[in-house]
Image (cartoon, rainbow, N blue to C red):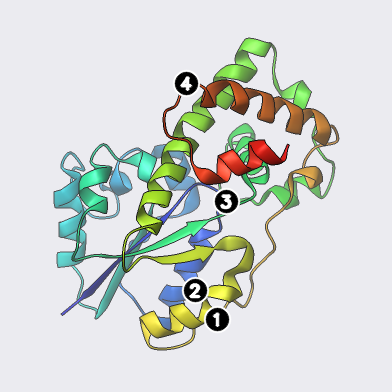
């Protein structure tokens, strides 16, 4: 019988690296979808391209993927805000969930901005910053444009963080902090029956490495966050902590 896994994460969390290492170690059945395809066209679960399904029924798509596996382990990675039926997926008791979260929210946002600015999801922010750090303020023609982009990012990110928080409180969920992958190595080994190697892992970049005007970036994002959390009844603890520490 196939053991079913879904790795659940927010964008720019290092989760793809984790999935790649698991697949390389245990020879699991997983879709072959690269970052660029995800960035350009992945609006529904694998957008039919990986699984050969139309994606209109996400539950059927999930079940179709697992049913297609000939391996003892099948897994894929997803992001909660990609789904209209996320609550139904997350409530499945026949699926093992692994959550991946990066607690440095400011650096997560910086990485998302850089990737979207360059329309290249795969390239790490540090590689962009190797030649020259960017001027955050120069990316926007107006304050309205800045607010629209940050609003789009945070509407998705807050949903993802809340979904992860709920899953983390569910019995059986394996929680991984992507800033400290090695801390989860024992639990991962117990889950998959052998050690998962993290060879090749690159430290996630800090927002101060991405922008010349890093203080302006930090103040802008925190100011925006402070405004939008007033409109939300449920704020993820990691966001509350960020604002209380500021």
Q: Quadrant of the N terminus?
A: bottom left
Q: Residue at x 15, y 58 (%)?
A: 64
- Precedes in sequence: disc 3 or disc 1: 3
- The label shown at residue 231 is 4
The residues bearing labels 3 and 1 have C-alpha atoms spaced at a distance of: 21 Å
Residue position for label 2: 21
Q: Is residue 205 left or right of residue 85?
A: right
- The label shown at residue 122 is 3
Q: Residue at x 67, y 29 (%)?
A: 221
The residues bearing labels 1 and 4 have C-alpha atoms spaced at a distance of: 42 Å
Q: Position of residue 44 (x, y in %)?
A: 30, 41
Q: Residues within 10 Å of mark 1 (few under 14, many from 20)?
A: some
- Precedes in sequence: disc 4 or disc 3: 3
Residue position for label 1: 197
Q: Is residue 17 left or right of residue 193?
A: right
- Precedes in sequence: disc 2 or disc 3: 2
Is mark 3 in CB contact (under 8 Å) with mark 1? no
- Observer-side mark, 4 or 2, equals 4
């Amino acid at each position: 019988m196939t053991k079913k896994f879904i790795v659940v994460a927010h964008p720019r969390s290092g989760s793809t690296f984790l999935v790649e290492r698991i697949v390389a170690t245990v020879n699991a059945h997983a879709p072959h979808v690269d970052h660029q395809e995800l960035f350009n066209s992945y609006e529904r679960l694998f957008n039919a391209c990986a699984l050969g399904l139309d994606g209109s029924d996400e539950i059927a798509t999930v079940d179709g993927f697992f049913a297609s596996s000939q391996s003892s382990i099948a897994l894929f990675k997803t992001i909660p805000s990609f789904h209209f039926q996320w609550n139904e997926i997350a409530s499945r008791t026949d699926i093992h969930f692994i959550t991946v979260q990066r607690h440095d929210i400011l650096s997560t946002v910086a990485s998302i901005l850089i990737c979207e600015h360059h329309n290249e999801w795969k390239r790490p922010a540090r590689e962009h910053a190797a030649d020259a750090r960017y001027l955050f303020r120069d990316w926007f023609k107006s304050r309205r444009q800045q607010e629209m982009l940050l609003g789009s990012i945070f509407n998705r990110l807050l949903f993802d963080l809340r979904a992860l928080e709920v899953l983390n409180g569910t019995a059986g969920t394996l929680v991984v902090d992507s800033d400290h992958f090695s801390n989860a190595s024992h639990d991962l080994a117990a889950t998959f029956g052998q050690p998962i190697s993290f060879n090749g892992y690159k430290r996630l970049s800090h927002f101060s490495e991405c922008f010349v005007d890093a203080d302006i970036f930090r103040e802008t994002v925190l100011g925006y966050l402070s405004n939008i959390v007033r409109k939300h009844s449920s704020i993820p603890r990691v966001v509350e902590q960020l604002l209380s520490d500021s």
